[in-house]
Image (cartoon, grey):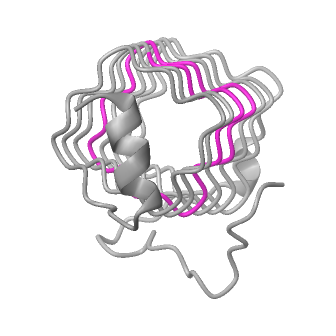
Amino acid sequence: MDIQQLLHEFNQGHRNFSKVQLHGVDLTGKFLSGVDFTGADLSGADLSGANLCRADLSCANLTDADLSQADLSGATLREVNFIGAELRHASLVGADLTQADLRTAILDNADLRGANLTEVALSGASVRHVNLASACITGVDLEDTDMEGTDLAQAKTLQTETACGTDHRWVSWGSH
């Protein structure tokens, strides 16, 4: 599938693009709210400034993708491969990143308020000046993670299996 076909189908109301192969595609600033990219290959893609609110990218490959200033508020990002991805100034408010792989990713100045980061791999990542207020960080691997200016005191670590679910009644899905 090429990008023009995807955008045409999306604009016609189609949302399921699971397992689509879009390696290196340019989706800069595109509105893709609610899209289903489950298991998709978006490695090396440029999604900077894209609106991916409430999108489902579970198990997608976003290795080396550029998601800087993207809006991923309320997105399902479970088990996503974000190795080497750029997420500077991205909004991930209320996103579910359970078991995502963010090793060597750059999340500087990202907004992760209320996000579920249970068992996320962040080793070697840059997580500078990130807002983690009310984020669940249970089981997060922070080995060799640059956390300069990031306050973990407002994040929560709970030991029960369902303790870090996001209460969507108070999460604002817009850009902040």
Residue 80 can be seen, yes or no = yes
> Does the magenta segment cover residue 90?
yes
In this rendering, would 92 be left or right of 103?
right
Tag count: 0
Vertical arrangement, residue 113 with respect to residue 21, above or below: below
**Residue 126 image point, x, y percent:** 62, 17
Please name the residue shown 25% across and 59% down the image: 16
Which SS type dominates the magenta stretch?
Answer: loop
Please name the residue shown 63% across and 63% down the image: 114
In this rendering, would 68 be left or right of 129?
left
Of residue 117 and residue 8, the one placed in the foreground of this image is 8
Please name the residue shown 31% across and 38% down the image: 80
Position of the C terminus, as image quadrant, is: bottom right
Give the residues in magenta. 65-91
**Residue 154 image point, x, y percent:** 74, 56
Of residue 26 and residue 110, the one placed in the foreground of this image is 26
> Quarter of the image holding residue 168?
bottom right
Position of the N terminus, as image quadrant, is: top left
Vertical arrangement, residue 61 with respect to residue 13, above or below: above
**Residue 93 image point, x, y percent:** 65, 57
> Does the magenta segment cover residue 75?
yes
Residue 96 can be seen, yes or no = no
Vertical arrangement, residue 100 with respect to residue 87, above or below: below
Vertical arrangement, residue 104 with respect to residue 52, above or below: above
Extreme residue toward the bottom, this view? 169
**Residue 99 image point, x, y percent:** 30, 44
Of residue 112 and residue 39, the one placed in the foreground of this image is 39
